[in-house]
Amino acid sequence: MVSSKHLTRRNFLLSSASVLGLTAITASVSLSSPSPEIPGNILGAAYKIGHKLRGGSFPEPTETRETNIAIIGGGIAGLSAAWKLQKSGISDFMIFDMDTDVGGNARSGQNAVSAYPWGAHYVPLLTQESKAAHELFEDFGIITGTRNGLPVYNDYYLCSDPHERLYMYGHWHDGFVPEIGVSESDQEQHRNFFAEMERYKFMRGKDGRRGFSIPVDTSSQDPSFKHFDTFSMADYMSQQGWNAPSLIWYVDYCCCDDYGATYDQVSAWAGIHYFASRNGRAANADSQTVITWPEGNGWFVERFKQRLKGHCLADALVYSVKPDGHGVRILYLDVTNNKTVEVKAKAAVMATPRFVAQRLTGATKNNEAFQYSPWVVANITLDALPEGRGAPLSWDNMIYGSSLLGYVVATHQNLNRIQTSTVLTYYWPLSDKLPAQAREEAIGRSYTEWCAIFLKELLAIHPELHGHVRNIDIWLWGHGMIRPTPHFIWGQERREALIPTPPLFYAHSDMSGISIFEEAHYRGVKAAEDLMSYIHHPYETSI
């Protein structure tokens, strides 16, 4: 944690919120006025089913099935592994997922107004090192060709203008680097910070690799870069003398956005990586453009599902995965029929978080370094559009001084630019408490309490929306993403997690230490390629 001489995020948020005229919303918010009755539900990954893994009893198997390859987990990593196997000519495989549908934290929903994301909602332009993702983007028609040596992205999938805006002191302004009320000396800190991040973007180690790249494991192994993993981003900024409240808020926001953790909770390596790793370019877009859809990364999930019809089995809680001398013996609970099914496979891809994989395989080592951030996402349906002074409504809308990350407008990509209704997707990483405590509090909250929290924030900045909220649905992510705490990215436990243990091959973004689409896809493809090498199946490498 940041030392007492540093300005902590909580103290900063409380002080800035008082200037805003808002009360900073935290996980310990006092709900003095419950929300009115608004239709909606608390949704989320099937944690009650998943918690059976903690020691629930299961019936003896009454059915046996066989498959060549079993993929445990249907998030982006598992779907990507299946995509690679299929492209390489393997058709005998099955994906098992305990939830009602595959997709993991890239799942999406839809109502009469719009499709909307339940988690991951965009991908920036791909880095030069993201070879596997580049192949997928070409396959799915996101990249349609090249021009002057640069990829051409499908114009329909590039985020429309305006991209983003920030709410400060009752006024919206373009971009989300704070500008209003920022002194000249603090602006100088901003300039120095961005100049340093830009310098790191081009720096290479003695091994010739960029210091910070995507996928993470293509980054330089030079100790001059890796040492940033031994202390926090807050400590790094203190060492540099960067203490401007506006800059601290901005860096803290970015850490929460990608890691679900505050800048004093993540390593300096991860913090710098956020700014220095992206070097994507396009022939038809500027480098800051992102790829997105109304349903966010649920767009990928639907394309994967179309390709993998007949291979995905939902409501299948795998609770045991054990090598048996001839391959792998898998036991799963058919949740719908409450019966256990045995599956025999030659090999398996474990596309689950590390803590789940440990339970399934019976591993005795406790990977304590693997910590996960809980998240809450609210999709709020309105029969009017948000307004406000200053910059116009944008795709991404952030609020200075709030512990919530702001909202994304699901209808922003709608080709019908004349709209009277919309869906706002609000994101909130529960980062102000230890993950276990935050998870427990989140699960214990009622729908009315969740509505009160999100309405309090929304109506404080958009009083014109009183009476225009038509539905609020809440999604709880108990283990939403891996937290790149100090010593984790280049620590021993992550290194050990990267070692295949045939016939089991591991694939999840937590193995990278950073939960982004490119890492999940890379891990899935890497596991599929390692597996194919093990069974002596020919393939063309994507990585």
Image (tube, rainbow, N blue to C red):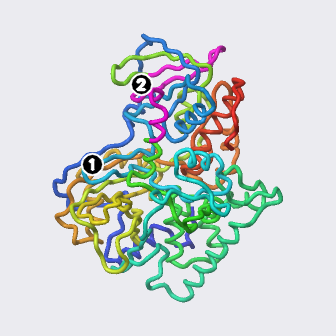
Q: Position of residue 260 (x, y in %)?
A: 49, 55
Can the viewer see residue 528 in this picture? Answer: yes
- SS category of the residue bearing label 1: loop
Crowdedness of circle 1 by 10 Å Cα count: few (<14), some, many (20+)? few
Can the viewer see residue 19 in this picture? Answer: no
67 vs 277: above or below: above
514 vs 290: above or below: above
Where is mark 2, residue-wise? 56
The mark closer to the camera, 2 or 1, is: 1
Where is mark 1, residue-wise? 111
Question: Would you say residue 454 sits in the magenta stretch?
Answer: no
Type of residue at label 1? Asn
Start and end of the magenta stretch? 303-332
412 vs 183: above or below: above
Q: Residue at x 53, y 20 (%)?
A: 330
Using the rendered view, name the quadrant where residue 510 is placed: top right
Type of residue at label 2? Gly
Q: Position of residue 254 (x, y in %)?
A: 52, 64
- SS category of the residue bearing label 2: loop
Using the rendered view, name the quadrant where residue 60 is placed: top left
Quarter of the figure with the N terminus: bottom right
